[in-house]
Image (cartoon, grey):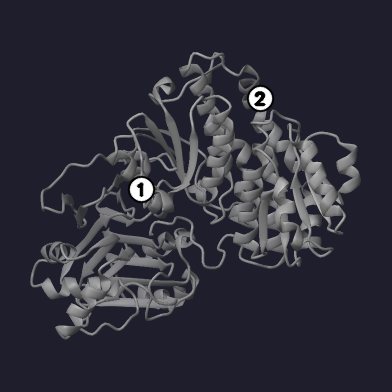
Amino acid sequence: MCGIVGYVGKGNALDILMPSIERLEYRGYDSVGIAVSTGTEIIQLKKKGKVKTLEEAVKLLKNKNQINLGIAHTRWATHGEPSEINAHPHSDSKKEISIVHNGIIENYSILKKMLEDEGYQIISETDSEIIAHLIAKFYTTNLEKAVMQALSLIEGSYALAIISKKEDKLIIARNGSPLAIGIGDGEYFVASDVTAFLEYTSKVIYLEDYEMAVLDKNNCVIKNFKGEEIFKEVIETKLKIDQIKKGNYKHFMLKEIFEQPNAVQNCLRGRIKNNKVRLSINIDFSKITRIIFVACGTSWHACLVGKYILENILPIPIDVEYASEFRYKKLFLKKTDLVIALSQSGETADTIEAIKQAKKYGAKTLGIVNVVGSTISRQVDSGIFLYAGPEIAVASTKAFSTQITALLLLSIYAQESLKQKANQALINELKIIPEKIKEVFASIDQIKKIANELKDAPLILFLGRGINFPVILEGVLKLKEISYVFSEGFPAGEIKHGPIALIDKDVPVIFVATKNNQLGKTINAMQEVKARGAKIISIVNSENTEINMLSDYVYNIPPSLEEISPLLSIIPLQLFAYYVADAKGLDVDRPRNLAKSVTVE
């Protein structure tokens, strides 16, 4: 879950590495480091904290040297606490090799003991440092050969970038963690996310597992781990540098919340023609006997919404699994099963492994991802891209909305596949939903007021029924992620089975009470909560006198079909979480202990 960048070429590496690693700070920000080769030595600078802590030291170094080769890293700790000594890059004892690493070395303890028995001194608590020592162990005059020998001993996941003071080369390798190469004019860029080098090039090569590249300013040679040279397609990314800037917004999260109307519009664009859905997938739902959704975090909540929508169309069982559990379960998959993987980044480690498991059994696979060229998009049989644009804030917002949009499109596609009459009302409402989302922002000052009033609450409960249940789970996750307020979400009917014991006058309760056939039951839960003195905040899409009487605050969203309602009801919950965190003075975009893409297990 760390950020990696590298550069080799005719430019000044420090001018490129520092802004590049800053763009990847959302992938990890507990420590940062840079290593450059001057031709005679490797200089490493490392600091605990964010990228800005390194700026002064880099400025002094840049004034003294013209440097054309280097690597940098921003860390999210796995092995070893955040500290300067545990920060990357890591070197061998002679300071001849320097490496940056994203991933986990599973046989770390065995390799560490072997190296220590041979007299190597391991100074950090990380699993990554042993990679530098292993390469040094095998290195004589050929860095590429030494890297391949070291990799033959390593078990686990990694994206690696390696330099040596003896060679003007940058070597990278991938197994289980993302890594891309940017192609410039007499220069090459490396990063764990293409957003790092968008300012310099739009030409990208994505490495697959068990591939490596040897780069100098004139050449890019890609090989498999057998040493065989392979051809890789150069892809022109459509991302633009302006898309990853904050603009006039205080935080990326707020910007991305407000981008949701456009994101949903982009997800829909070109996919509804002549009142029919057109997706670039080839799935005959009449031949599917079961659907299994796999995902993590926010994407898992979107899957719950998708289950609710598709269950009303398809006469087959639909399951939703945490990818981290699915990959280790005893599976009973068949060739007639469809496994649908959701991931914003397309690089979520557990979800990638879940897809691999599904393919072993011959099940059909469908990916719903945001990042074109991501690992999941390349592994699945077919896919639906979200086209939400880059999502920089750690707390996901527009990915959730576009995932639901994609699932709504999939539901109509399934109807057409089954020769059913398409849900024309749903198609009509999808066409206008971006405008309805904009309407939700009209009462934003009300959300700010509620957030300021409740920011110090010791506990906040969220309740909803039916399709509203996954929506409140997503609202809970947003609040926990960025404001650190303890919150829990329950189906409203479950309040009597334990959670009501938590309620008193100091525990506010947020209800998503949009119109559905269970609204009366939700109102019953409101009455039970009100009887215990709790403050009630209700999100509604229809006029209801009883809800108005029971609630301290009522937030109105536009009326909609039940299937569409999550696209509207999630917005006030996202804004509430944002304004609570902002009122508490927290770093909204970089919440503690979290990173954007979970690319390690």
Q: Residues within 10 Å of mark 1 (few under 14, many from 20)?
A: few
| Other residues around mark 2 within 10 Å, as few (<14) / some (14–19) / many (≥20) | some
Q: Residue at point 52% right, 53% down? A: 392
Relative to 293, say whether 75 is above or below: below
Residue 251 percent across, percent down from the top left: 62, 57
**Which quarter shows the C terminus?**
bottom left
Q: Judging from the image, what secondary structure is the residue with disc 1 in?
A: loop
Residue drawn at point x = 60 percent, y = 36 percent = 262
Write down the residue under mark 2: 429
Number of numbered markers: 2
Residue 434 position by quadrant: top right
Residue 82 as seen in the image, left or right of residue 459: left
Identify the residue at the far front of this view: 497
Q: Which residue appears at 53% of the width and 38% of the height? A: 403
Which residue lies at the image location 73% right of the left edge and 42% below the top edge? 441
Q: Would residue 293 be seen by someone viewing this image from the given angle?
A: yes
* Residue 138 sits in quarter: bottom left
**In the image shown, does 278 or 237 lie closer to the viewer?**
278
Please name whichever residue, 109 or 154, is drawn nearer the observer in this view of the structure: 109
In percent of width and height, residue 422 lies at 57, 16
User: Disc 2 or disc 1, which is closer to the eye?
Assistant: 1
Query: Mark 1 highlights which residue?
Result: 330
Check the image and report above or below for 209 versus 466: below
Q: Is residue 64 visible?
A: no
* Viewport quadrant of the N terminus: bottom left
Residue 166 in percent (x, y) is at 15, 72
Q: Amino acid at mark 1?
A: Lys
Out of 468 and 123, give the one closest to the viewer: 468
Q: CA distance from mark 2 to mark 1?
A: 41 Å
